[in-house]
Image (spheres, grey):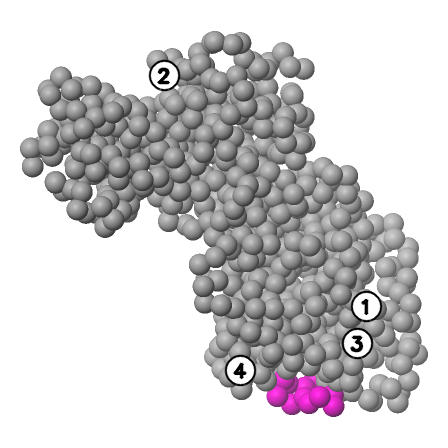
Amino acid sequence: MRSQSGTAAPERTDDPKEHNQTIRPRDLLTKEDHLEIFKLLFLARYFDVRLIKEKKRGRLRGTLYSSHNQEAVLVGCLYGLRPDDWISPIHRDMPAFFLKDIKFKWDDPARMGMSIEELCAQVWGKAGSPGRARDNWSHIGSKSKHIIHSTSMLSGTIPAAAGVVYADRLNGGDVIAMTLNGEGSTAQGIFHEAINFAAVHKLPVVTIIENNHWAYGTPTHMEYSQEDFARRADGYGIMGLVADGQDVLDVYDKVMMAVNHSRAGNGPSIVECKTFRAYGHGDHDDDRAAKYRPEAEILKGRERDPIGVYRQYLLEKGYISPEDAKLYIAENKGAGEVGNEDFPPEVVAYLSKGIDYALTCPVPEAEEGGMWVFKEGGR
Amino acid sequence: MSATVDVPAQVGVKKNYLTALKEALFEEMSLNPHMICQGEDIGILGGAFGVTEGLQAQYGAQRVIDMPISEACIVGSAVGMALNGKTVMAEMQFIDFISCGFDQIVNMMATYHYRTAGEVNIPVVVRGPAGAYGGGALYHSQMNESWFCNSPGLKVICASTPSDAKGLLKTALRDGNPVISYEIKELYRRNDIAEVLPDEDYTVPFGKAAIRKAGKDITLVSYGQNVYHCIQAADELEKLGVSAEVIDIRTLVPLDEETIFNSVAKTNRVIVVNEAPMTCGFAGEIVSRISTKAFDLLDAPPVRITRLDTPVPWVKPLELFVLPSVEKIVQAALKTVKY
């Protein structure tokens, strides 16, 4: 960890040995796990590039906040969670809705994650959306699947996450709540207020900071003055870790250390995943982003594509053969440069199934706009 | 353990507004094992005004939580608890401080049922001491209820009597929707309004106004402590030969239009009194509904008597200058009946 302050740097908190973990979480993953994670990276990427294309063709309303190049954060954060753990994704985390509890059961209707059909119905603004398309894109969730519904007010779900696990602890449970946040939202007062509350009560709230170094059009040096968000954790007396957000296994290691730590009753934790935003803030911003962001930075960021980083690891470990490694190459390509042939066929089929469902789904009746303001009939 | 608990009460004893609130909380905490109370200083201290005195001793620190000074987190975490099956009473130490939790209330809490197409409902009651006339100055005197009446998804209530304070709070805690409750701190310990409360478990329904004094010449519509100003004004008007009917709406959202319209049908004249600023205040909403839905009933222009469009100043002459008063109501009534 680097420190910009004049005082002595705090003890490293990102070294697994600091937490008496001689075995890293990744060491417990099987070959099947690794191949599943690899496929999930493709699935997250495919979801993004397919929607970018649909959006460009004018088939979708609203704004697409691309998660391109940030897939390792999403997959690494969600892969090791228990099905009954709670999450709260934000606008750039659309794949998180189906990545929750997807491991080896993509098509299981009972899984505690959103089905690809439900998610596509939401994106297309159809009645099959879990929120019946009342709010747009990522502003959905599911009480039964333990996904907290976000608003546009960033960091705004961290107090809800704390409340959810407070209630769970009162009931004798041991779930954790993971909130996903951009680094820009850490400037909000509610970020501090909620984590402070969680720390006081040692609540298992795992706060992920997806640091892609741009808050819409504002670079990091205008957003905060620390080099690493992990040091914020020191202020609350909680665990803070930094992960390489382009390396899915590093994300997995740090996140699972934090999850295990928090679940065990040691209080909340913060994991900062340093990553790179491939495009604009939203698709409406792509053209301007190409101007306000230095070209050298974009080129450098694209060099470390999370799919490519992981492919190299799998090759070195012998989990995939050199022949397998050449089959599907989606990495280091822009959304407009990839085709279906760059992705495993089961990935293409999975999303296509969701889109087919969304296209056949009706738009909600207009009168629904006036419904569900109040619940009738008491609590 | 229950030494500090002054409930259940003795039969036949008059109780003040604050005791009535306290009884509601004790009873609902006892009836609903999934209820949580949280707020600043509500546990060890028993609340800045003592509304929650004895509650933590009775129900434990896990269900009666002393929160860090963060209204946003008090509300926001309550939303999460509700999402996971709890009913929450969230106390604002003063209702003025509710602005620090504004986003969590209007964007997170109020809209939850709507944006989930009914999957989620949020049984959270945000309650706190409100109102002026006590020298509380700018930040301990507010009536900011119109902010929340203008945020769909919230119910807004304001009790003026001990029996309503208890009955409305119990209804709020069973309602299933987020409720903002304006408690009038100047009424908390007023002995002259103390009442004998029903022995049985009772509630006061939302959306049902109370006629505090019957009359036939003019209708005075109000809520909170201005109800007493209206009653006093009606008494003075009576001496001057004018019969005023006083309606206490009790709940703003939902609003009992029927009782108001029935009264105006009888009197054909109406004055609405509240202590919030006039512009975009709830008095304007009531006048608007009368004007649009019951225009033919009116023989005179409806009148609003509200706080001036100013903050609430500190020292007494200034404070009283900007607020509604018995005198202002009487003068306006005399003018309106002669219109």
Q: Give how far across and how far down residue A362 sits, in percent.
A: 55, 74
Left or right of A217? Residue A356 is right
Picture coordinates of residue A6, whole percent (x, y): 62, 52
Q: Residue at x 40, y 29 (%)?
A: B159
Q: Is residue A338 magenta?
A: yes
Q: Chain of mark 3?
A: A
- CA separation in Å, label 2 and label 1: 64 Å
Q: How many marks?
A: 4
Q: CA distance from mark 1 to mark 3?
A: 13 Å
The reply to whether label 4 and label 2 mark residues of one chain is: no
Name the residue rendered at 81%, 68% in the picture: A105
Give me the C-alpha separation between circle 2 and circle 3: 71 Å
Please tell me which of labels 4 and 3 falls first in the chain: 3
Q: Mark 1 — residue? A: A105
Which residue was labeled with disc 4?
Answer: A59
Which quadrant: the N terminus of chain A?
Answer: bottom right
Q: Chain of mark 1?
A: A
Under circle 2, the secondary element is helix
Q: Callout 3: helix, strand or loop?
A: helix
SS at mark 4?
loop
- Name which residue lies at 44% across and 42% down: B155
Q: Residues within 10 Å of mark 4 (few under 14, many from 20)?
A: few
Q: Residues within 10 Å of mark 3 (few under 14, many from 20)?
A: some
Label 2, on which residue? Answer: B193
Mark 1 vs mark 3: in front: 1
**Is the C-beta separation of discs 1 and 4 under 8 Å?**
no
Relative horizontal placement of residue B33, taking residue B184 as reference (left or right): right
| Residue type for callout 4 | Arg
**What's the residue type where badge 1 is placed?**
Lys
Tag 2: residue type?
Ile
Residue matched to label 3: A39
Q: In the image, which residues are magenta? A: A332-342
